[in-house]
Image (cartoon, helix red, strand yellow):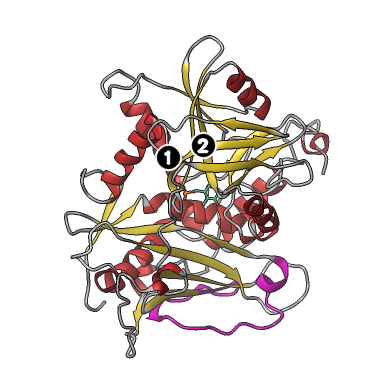
Amino acid sequence: MSPSAISTTPPNGMDKTTDLAASAIEQKIAETAPALSKIASDSKLAPLDASKLKFTRNTTPKTLPALDDPIRNTSSFCTDHMITAVWSASTGWAAPELKPYGPFSIMPNASVLHYATECFEGMKAYRGFDGALRLFRPDCNTRRMLTSATRISLPAFEPSELEKLIVNLMAIDGAKFLPEDQPGKFIYIRPTMIGTHAGLGVQIPSEAMLYVIATYMPVLSEPTHGMKLLASQNDMVRAWPGGFGYAKVGANYGPSLIAQQEAKSRGYDQVLWLLGNEGSVTEAGASNFFVVWKSKEGKLQLVTAPLADKIILDGVTRRSVLQLVRERLSDNKTGLQPLEIVERKYTMTEVAEAYDDDRIVEAFACGTAFFVVGVSDIHHRGKDLKIPVVRGNAGEYATLIKSWLKNIMYGKEQHEWGYIVEPKETL
Ligand SMILES: *Cc1c(COP(=O)(O)O)cnc(C)c1O
């Protein structure tokens, strides 16, 4: 669809064209999670309810792999249990279950296998240096999951109920797979929703399943000299206006793998995703991207792409970085100069210009998977920008921000973003 088709305003003042997604999503929420909806609904469907959780203990629990067991680096080793919750358009959400991790069967004509009705979240549980097990801002992940699910016509749910389910999974499996005597370790949690409706018609799934699994993930080794980014070429974009770049849906990732592979084969770590002829800078791989530069007027700024045009993902790490910088880097108390936060559309041309003028201070990418990683190189149209990494593999700001976040995640700083999970033997 051309941008002009998206922005046509009909005479009655309400923009029916741009409203296509927004009103459909509002309707979906009213039908499937009426408590969340602004519009009236007489829906009788059962809401997602964590208090109904049924528990079946795994009677063949796994052996905890040793710290040096290579299985830990494969992202294939899941914990003993998982959460599942089944939804149907006629009854709503059935009682969720916490049960042994294992395969489930779906029909070959299931919606998800044909029409990409799949969305997911990525978060971690951290074993703190104070012994506590923490989630980091789980409310942000569960709210984003609602956004992603409804964007692809999967049912809505109360995010706080999903949060309780995640907490229950970690309360059961956390103590074993993240032992208290191994502080500084994490486990990756993957809430997922799929359309299970069996039928090949291109239609909204009338059946769906929500599930949550937890797995070991390799500690993504930080590039010793910082991350090298290859700016995307014109024949490949990650997301576009009116699309779904802001949703964590599987459909965003499969098609980007070939670019990632090509970047790797050319010696780069990730693709820096640009958009449009003007080369708007959006994200780095599946991470948000930040530049610290001096503006032409000499202002020290932290620049990142905006959320409003729905091209980039509203990263929990991104949002936390911005909040911490706003709270802690607005004065001179840290020893580093204050940063002005700028969330706006900016282009690779501006970055290259700042580079030529020697105004780039540093750049970094951030997300749950990579955490905060300094960027050392950006290759764009035959030109290599060498970004300063004065602290070995990152700049001063990235290094400081990273330490703040780490302290919160691992309990060195008690902070409201750290949600403590109390272990349970049974439910
Ligand atoms: C998951 C993801 C991020 C990072 O989000 P966090 O909530 O910080 O983990 C950024 N961009 C994309 C495209 C992502 O998929």
Three-letter residue code for mark 2: Ser
Describe the element under mark 2 as helix, strand or loop. strand
Taking the spot 60% from the left edge, 50% from the top edge, the residue there is 26
CB atoms of marks 1 and 2 within 8 Å: yes
Mark 2 = which residue? 376
Residue drawn at x 59%, y 16% as measured from the top left? 357
Q: Which amino acid does label 1 sit on?
A: Asn
Residue 106 painted magenta: yes
Name the quarter where the N terminus is drawn. Answer: top right
How far apart are the alpha carbons under marks 1 and 2?
7 Å
Relative horizontal placement of residue 160, taking residue 356 as reference (left or right): left
Compare residues 215 and 26 and report the one nearer the observer.
Answer: 215
337, above or below 318, in the image:
above
Q: What element carries label 1?
A: loop
Q: What stretch is highlighted in magenta?
A: 86-115
Q: Residue at x 33, y 34 (%)?
A: 400
